[in-house]
Image: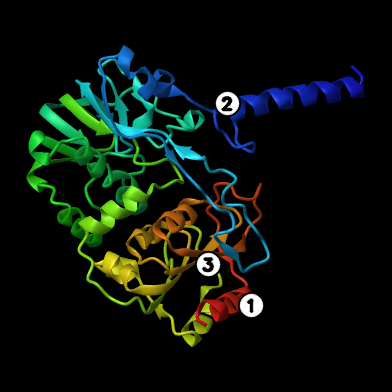
Amino acid sequence: MSDNFRAKLRKAKNQGVNSLKKFLNLPSQSKLYGPSGLATNWLDYNGYSQSDVAWQQVYPTIKCHWNPQKTTNWGRYTYNFTKNLKPEIPPTGVVIIPNGQVMDIQGYTFTKDDQFLVDVSYWRHRLGYANLPKEKYPTEKIKGTCLSLMTNASSNYCHFLLDSLPRLHLFYQAGYTLDDVDYILLHQPISPNAWSIFRQLGINESKCQWAKKNTTFQADTLIATTHPSLNLHHPRWLVDFMTKKIDLKPCQPQRRLYIPRPTGRRKVANEDELLSILTEYGFEIFKPEEEVNQPQVFHEASIIVASHGAALSNLVFCQPGTKVLELMSNGHLREYFFTLCQVAGLEHHYIIGKTTQPISYVGGLCFHDFIINPTFLTKALYFLTK
């Protein structure tokens, strides 16, 4: 076999793989690995009429206008936040599923015949990532009607706040009230702050069935909703719902917050070097884990500097015009808070730092700490505080 023939064969193979990745909405760097397991037998809203699932649309397709110019880079490395975003959010609504099933704290939702309802998950536009277990977990029965607020990664504060709780809005808009259900399935709030938000939503705790790992719940009648948005995307109604439901005292935003990330992954490795600069520009060190009313603190902020992480989901409570400087790792670039800033009317800025260890490719799933150049931070703060 000649070298020329090998090159042509390699090119043809790569073109075929890339075409399949595009069809499944996988990034070009990603390996094909889904749908797999229980996700191979899937159903979306286009097929509900051929099943026993009843579909109530709440919102039609929502057009998105993501503007790549609505962010400012203060570092050396740039990122196009809009390249992976979709131009629209598919129809959202409520599904009623006879003998419906919800599995694990990931909220995998199925019909009684084990069809995976992809629209309920954050894989609704990227089925290729749906890598589910091969078999269902042991089942516990729920008598009566159950509303599921479950979502993927529901034990994470960001997904609990932005993907789980806003499902209540779709439920209400479809004409239901909490009096219409016997049980509510969701992940137990993970912190005093999360409990405070949960209680302000008026959910009767006595009706709650907390999700469990490695357990499937099956209700006589299951009411679930589509994912409120799309992964990485947020609709404006989500911001309106959360800010109206949570008690936010009126104020003039003046606080300058720096949010450290002392534990977990993707920490700023040279944070101590940056603290003196932040202090010089009048920033207070705000530790969310010590605050039971995070929504109000973010509501009072005029400038927020923070590493990419779940704490920034509280941006949903900021007042329009708040300035946000997101510190990001070149090994983990995500659009969550760029899109949240756009729909909430916030001003997005960013600095990308290099990881402390080599990475296979830029923007993937990386847990390494990273370094922020102090000169870039100083330049950004000088502008943001003028």
Q: CA distance from mark 2 to mark 1?
A: 43 Å
Dot in front, 3 or 2: 2
Q: Earlier in the sequence, mark 2 or mark 1?
A: 2
Report the residue marked by disc 1. 375
Residue at label 2?
Answer: 23
CA neighbours of label 1 inside 10 A, class few (<14), some (14 to 19), many (20+)? few
Q: Which residue is mark 3?
A: 268
Check disc 3: other Cα within 10 Å, few if <14, some if 14-19, many if 20+.
Answer: many
The quarter of the displayed image where residue 15 is located: top right
Q: CA distance from mark 3 to mark 2?
A: 36 Å
| Residue 154: percent from left, percent from top | 32, 44
Picture layout, residue 363 above or below residue 33: below
Q: Is residue 233 visible?
A: yes
Q: Nearer the viewer, residue 364 or 98?
A: 98
Number of marks drawn: 3
Would residue 215 be visible to someone looking at this image? Answer: no
Identify which residue is drawn at 24% across, 61% down.
Answer: 193
- Quote the CA–CA distance across marks 3 and 1: 15 Å
The nearer-to-camera label among 2 and 1 is 2
Amino acid bearing label 3: Val
Q: Say which of 159 and 325 sits in front.
A: 325
Rendered-image quadrant of the N terminus: top right
Q: Residue at x 92, y 20 (%)?
A: 2
